[in-house]
């Protein structure tokens, strides 16, 4: 809602200390003498420096007091019934009746002073302060109503260890309960993620293979289950190549933004494995049977633009401007009415939830067998002995 003169430019920068000093001086002006024209002008400038949007109700109050101070009681005709914004502004001004200009000026100065005080106590914290503690393989931060979960093993291309699967589940669980509107999953470094860490298959004593395969299937079921059940909009910010499970679960996200440097690769057959992440169901639905088969069965690697053309990716951005463009977009989306957004997400997902859980269970029991196969073991040994790479 734009209100000329009274309320503009909430995001113009000002150091917290200068805000505090000005807030204090405005408070001090609330003495018996009443607010002067200079105080009023200073308050108008102060409004432009507020970092936190005070909300429409307060903006209307400010607008009304501004008009009353500068023009006196409202004497213009009421805007038409469909001119909602101007009608709301007129109503707020008109409600002040015959309030004297001096009192309106004082009230305006007092209101701005209160807003400035609460604004300066909620200044943006530095990145290090926003980082949530307790994660070793992730960096989790919350800002602008967005919780960002960043996979943080760049030297290993963000390959997913058992600990990382568990930490992502914990971070999702916490994010489902925090006050964020959107949740973002992304990667640190040049890769989004190279998929399952193939070291997860190593160092298993000979007699323990079946038990470990079973544990792996349970971990995978729970991991994918978290994405199926997640109640808020999930956004993948694909900063570079994505492999294996980091690709398949994209079918469970609400938005997928990719750098034009990203690629999408599911080389399951080469690895003696089979699709997971509900991709055996979501991919044919998203891109059609033929394209899904080429990816999931024959391991065709897609460029970001191909993945976008096939509906797996929402939008592709040039790598040079990727972060800036994506985060600007997400910050705008995070201001949408939170409850409406979450209810829409849940309505869409609820239609499919039961089916997705059944698909997840089915895929995992097939994979549990695959992990015990010679084809899978040979592929892992080849990679680890550096004979094979994707
Ligand atoms: C329990 C749940 C199970 C869920 C199952 C999911 C299925 C999948 O996700 S299948 C996909 C598995 N992923 C792969 O097969 C990728 C294997 N990695 C590669 O082919 C290559 O590393 C690469 C193409 C991703 C990158 O090649 P590049 O030459 O650029 O870099 P590298 O020198 O190979 O990698 C750097 C460093 O990172 C290690 N690394 C990378 N990816 C993995 C991985 N997936 N598992 C284990 N380690 C990985 C790589 O070994 C290097 O480590 P060192 O520097 O120590 O040699």
Image (spheres, rainbow, N blue to C red):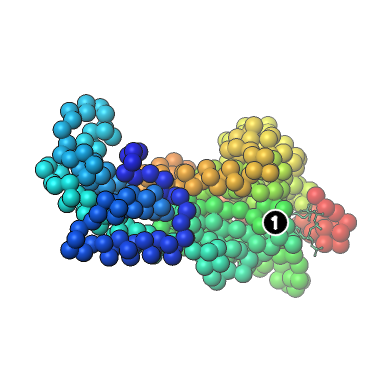
Q: Is mark 1 within 8 Å of ligand 1?
A: no
| Badge 1: residue crowd in 10 Å (few <14, some 14–19, many ≥20) | some
The furthest residue to the right: 387
Q: Which of 381 and 183 is in front in this view?
A: 183
Q: Residue at x 47, y 60 (%)?
A: 15
Please state the horizontal and vertical placement of residue 90, each as a whole percent of the image. Answer: 21, 36
* Residue drawn at point x = 32 percent, y = 63 percent: 25
Identity of the residue furthest to the left in this view:
98
Q: In this view, does 160 lie above or below 307?
A: below
Residue 253 locus on image (x, y percent)? 54, 46
Quarter of the figure with the N terminus: top left
Quick one: 256 or 73, which is closer to the camera?
Answer: 73
Q: Position of residue 361 (x, y in %)?
A: 56, 53
Q: Ligand 1 is located in which of the four quadrants?
A: bottom right
Which residue occupies the foreground of this view, 28 or 143?
A: 28
Q: Is residue 279 left or right of residue 14?
A: right
Q: In this view, does 88 lie to the left or right of 119?
A: left
Residue under numbered circle 1 = 189
Left or right of 25, for residue 346 = right
Q: Relative to residue 136, is residue 88 depicted above or below?
A: above
Secondary structure of residue under mark 1: loop
Q: Can residue 352 be seen in this view?
A: yes
Viewer can see residue 195: no
Residue 161 appears in which quarter of the rendering?
bottom right
Instruction: Please determine whether, in this image, residue 17 is positioned above or below residue 311.
Output: below
Q: In the rendering, at what x and y percent does residue 359 appear? A: 56, 47
Name the residue rendered at 11%, 43% in the picture: 98
Point 61% across, 47% down: residue:
323
Q: Quadrant of residue 372?
A: bottom right
Between 208 and 328, the one lying in front of the other is 328
């Amino acid at each position: 809602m734009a209100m000329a003169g009274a309320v503009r430019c909430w995001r113009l920068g000002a150091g917290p200390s200068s805000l505090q000093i000005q807030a204090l001086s405005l408070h001090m002006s609330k003495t018996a003498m009443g607010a002067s024209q200079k105080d009023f002008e200073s308050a108008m400038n102060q409004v432009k420096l507020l970092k936190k949007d005070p909300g429409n109700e307060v903006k209307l109050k400010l607008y009304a007091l501004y008009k009353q101070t500068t023009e006196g009681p409202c004497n213009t005709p009421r805007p038409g019934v469909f001119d909602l914004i101007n009608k709301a502004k007129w109503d707020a001004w008109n409600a002040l009746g015959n309030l004297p200009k001096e009192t309106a000026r004082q009230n305006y100065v007092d209101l701005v002073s209160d807003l400035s005080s609460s604004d300066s106590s909620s200044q943006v914290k530095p990145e290090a302060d926003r980082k949530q503690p307790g994660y070793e393989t992730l960096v989790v931060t919350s800002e602008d109503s967005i919780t960002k979960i960043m996979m943080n093993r760049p030297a290993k291309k963000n390959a997913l260890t058992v600990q990382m699967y568990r930490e992502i589940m914990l971070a999702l669980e916490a994010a489902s309960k925090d006050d964020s509107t959107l949740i973002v999953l992304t990667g640190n470094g040049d890769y989004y993620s190279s998929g399952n860490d193939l070291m997860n298959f190593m160092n298993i004593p000979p007699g323990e293979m079946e038990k470990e395969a079973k544990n792996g299937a349970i971990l995978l079921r729970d991991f994918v289950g978290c994405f199926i059940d997640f109640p808020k909009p999930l956004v993948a910010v694909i900063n570079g190549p994505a492999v294996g499970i980091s690709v398949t679960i994209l079918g469970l996200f609400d938005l997928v933004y990719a750098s034009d440097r990203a690629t999408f690769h599911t080389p399951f057959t080469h690895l003696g494995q089979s699709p997971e992440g509900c991709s055996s169901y979501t991919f044919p639905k998203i891109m059609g049977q033929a394209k899904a088969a080429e990816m999931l069965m024959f391991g065709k690697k897609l460029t970001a633009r191909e993945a976008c053309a096939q509906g797996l990716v929402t939008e592709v951005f040039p790598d040079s401007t990727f972060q800036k463009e994506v985060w600007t977009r997400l910050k705008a989306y995070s201001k949408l009415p939170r409850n409406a957004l979450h209810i829409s997400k849940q309505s869409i997902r609820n239609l499919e939830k039961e089916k997705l859980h059944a698909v997840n269970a089915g895929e995992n029991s097939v994979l549990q067998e695959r992990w015990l196969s010679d084809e899978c073991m040979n592929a892992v040994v080849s990679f680890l002995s550096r004979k094979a790479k994707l």
